[in-house]
Image (spheres, rainbow, N blue to C red):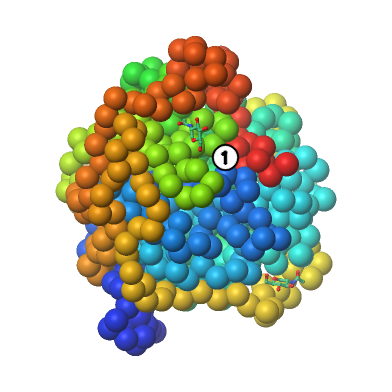
Amino acid sequence: MLTYSAALLAFGATLAAAVQPLEVQNGVFVNPKTGNQFHIVGIAYQPGGSGGYNPEKKIDPLSDKDVCLRDAALMQILGINTIRVYNLNPDINHDECASIFNAAGMYMLLDVNSPLPGESLTSWEPWKSYYAEYLNRTFAVVEAFKNYPNTLAFFSGNEVMNNEETGATVPPYMRAVTRDVKNYVKKHVSRPIPVGYSAADVRDILQDSYDYLQCSLSGDKGDMSKGDLFALNSYSWCGESSFKEASYDELVEIFKNADVPIFFSEYGCNTPSPRVFTEVGTIHSSQMVGFSGGVVYEYTQEPNNYGLVNISASGPVTLLSDFYSLKAQYAKLDFKEVQGLKAPTTSKPKPPTCDSKLITTKGFHSNFTNIPPPPPGAQDIIDKGVSPKPSGKIVKISDWKVKFDVFNNDGTKVEGLAVKPLADDEINQPGSNTAVVTQGADSTAGGGSSSSGSTSGDSKDENSAPRSAATIFTALAMGAFAVMAGMI
Ligand SMILES: *[C@@H]1O[C@H](CO)[C@@H](O)[C@H](O)[C@H]1NC(C)=O
Ligand SMILES: *[C@@H]1O[C@H](CO)[C@@H](O)[C@H](O)[C@H]1NC(C)=O
Ligand SMILES: *[C@@H]1O[C@H](CO)[C@@H](O)[C@H](O)[C@H]1NC(C)=O
C-alpha cells in the first residue's frame, strides 16, 4: 500500500514537507513513525465567525490562502499544533489552506456538519434531520479532506445532546451518524481517520452521553457505531482555578478507563477576562489521566468575546491580551515531555457492553436496539461513494510571507511575519516560528468595554457569554451557539 509520504514524494520533491498522519492506538493518538503519543495543543478556528462559512459566497475558514497564511503564522508563534474547524463546504477547494497548516506542523480536527438546515443532526426531533442528502454532505466533507496527511479526525456531531430532553431522543441517531461516517471512511479512505463526537460538558448527562456512545454493542459489527474518540467542550475552569475546583478530577474519573482518545474539543472560560489560561499547565500534565490535550476556544474575536486576535474586515489583525497570556502558558510547558511520551503498549480495558443499566439519568435514552439503520438511499452512497466526488491534495506554496499587517496590542507592528515551513514529520511547538510579538500596555483593554467603561470581564456585557458559577456545568453549546448566532 502506498503510504502518504510515498505518495507525496511521488508528486515531486518541491512539495513542502508533511506531518505524519496519526493513528489511534490504545486510547491515544500516536505518530506511527516515532511511536510517540500526540498531545493536542489546539485552537478553534473560525475566522469571520458566522459569516466565515457561506455556501453562497463559496467561502469557509479554509478557502482563502492569504488568510490561512496570516493565521498559521500567528498560531505557529503561539505553539499550536491542531486547529478545529466547524463549518466546511465540501465543494470548494481547500488545498492551499490545508497545505499551509500542514507545512506549519498543524493537524486539523474537522466537523462534518454545519448549523445550516440539512447540514447537521438536529437536537430536536433528530429523525427529521437524518436522511440521505444530509449524510451525503457529511461524506463529501470526508472526501474533500481525506487525502490531506494532517487531517486528524472528523467530528460526527457537536453538542447535539445538551440536556436531558435531547438526551432522550438523540443518542441512537448520534450512534447512527457515527456509524455511517465510519463506514464511509472504512470503504473509501486509505487510512483509518478517526470519527467521534464532541460533547457538551453538561455534567448531568456527560457520563450517560459517553456511556451510550462508547459502550460496546454486541452484534454491531466491529462496533461501527461506537466513536473512535470522545471529546468534550468544557468551560469549568475559570480564572485562577485548580484541578479540583474546576472539577477536572470528576472528568478524569469519568474517562480514566476510556479505550479511545479523550480531549477537550473546546476550553477557555472567558470570565474573568482577560483570561489567564492557568488550565493549560494542568491540561497538559500527567494529572489529566486519559486526556490527549485540548482545543482553546477560540482564535478570532467574535461577538461572544472568546478571541485571541481581533481581525478587521479588511484583513489587518490586532493581537489581544489573551493571545500573550496563552502564549506565556504554552511557553511554560516542557514540550519534549508533553509530546515525547511513548504510546502505551498495553490495551485499555474493554469498554462495557451496552446495556440499559449503564444509563443512570432518568429519561436519558437507554435502548440500544433501536439505533436506526441508514435512511433510504444512504447505503448506496456509502457503497458507491459520493458523486461527484470532491477531492483535495497537498499543493506547493511558493510564498510564505504574510500579506496582512499584524499589530501588537500596543499598536506596534509585528515585523517579518511569515509561516515557517517545518521539516518532514515535524509538528509545531513554541519556538518553531521566531517572529517576535511583544505585549505592550493594552491599548485595546478598553476595546471590549469602551462603550460602558465598565470593568473588563463583566459577564453581563452583552457581548460575552454568560458564565456564572451556576452555569458552569450546564455550559451551553458554545461552539454551536457562536456559530449559529452568527448564521442568523
Ligand atoms: C452529494 O454530494 C456531492 C458533493 O457535495 C454533491 O455534488 C451531490 O449533489 C450530492 N448528492 C446528493 C444526492 O445530495
Ligand atoms: C427498544 O427498541 C426496540 C426497537 O424499536 C423496541 O422493540 C423495544 O421495545 C425497545 N425497548 C424498550 C425497553 O423500550
Ligand atoms: C476589534 O476591532 C474592532 C474594529 O475593527 C473594534 O471596534 C473592536 O473594539 C475591537 N475589539 C477588541 C476586543 O479589541
Q: Secondary structure at mark 1?
A: helix
Residue 284 vs 6, above or below: the answer is above
Along the horizontal axis of the image, is 434 left or right of 295? left
Along the horizontal axis of the image, is 319 left or right of 363? left
| Residue at image point 56% right, 31% down | 304
Looking at the picture, tell me which residue is in the foreground, 215 or 401.
401
Q: If the image is split into quadrants, where does the N terminus sit?
A: bottom left
- The reply to whether residue 141 is in sight is yes
Residue 444 vs 296, above or below: the answer is above
Along the horizontal axis of the image, is 28 left or right of 438? right
Looking at the picture, tell me which residue is in the foreground, 65 or 34.
65
Looking at the picture, tell me which residue is in the foreground, 235 or 445.
445
| Residue at image point 36% right, 26% down | 443
Write down the quadrant of residue 140 in the picture. Answer: bottom right
Q: Position of residue 385 (x, y in %)?
A: 65, 77
- The reply to whether residue 186 is in sight is no
Count of labels shown? 1
Q: Residue furthest top?
A: 454
| Residue at image point 51% right, 67% down | 94
| Residue at image point 29% right, 54% down | 417
Residue 455 vs 400, above or below: the answer is above
Q: Position of residue 288 (x, y in %)?
A: 33, 35
Question: Pointer 1: what residue?
Answer: 479
Looking at the picture, tell me which residue is in the foreground, 313 or 4.
313
Question: Hey, what amino acid is under mark 1?
Answer: Gly
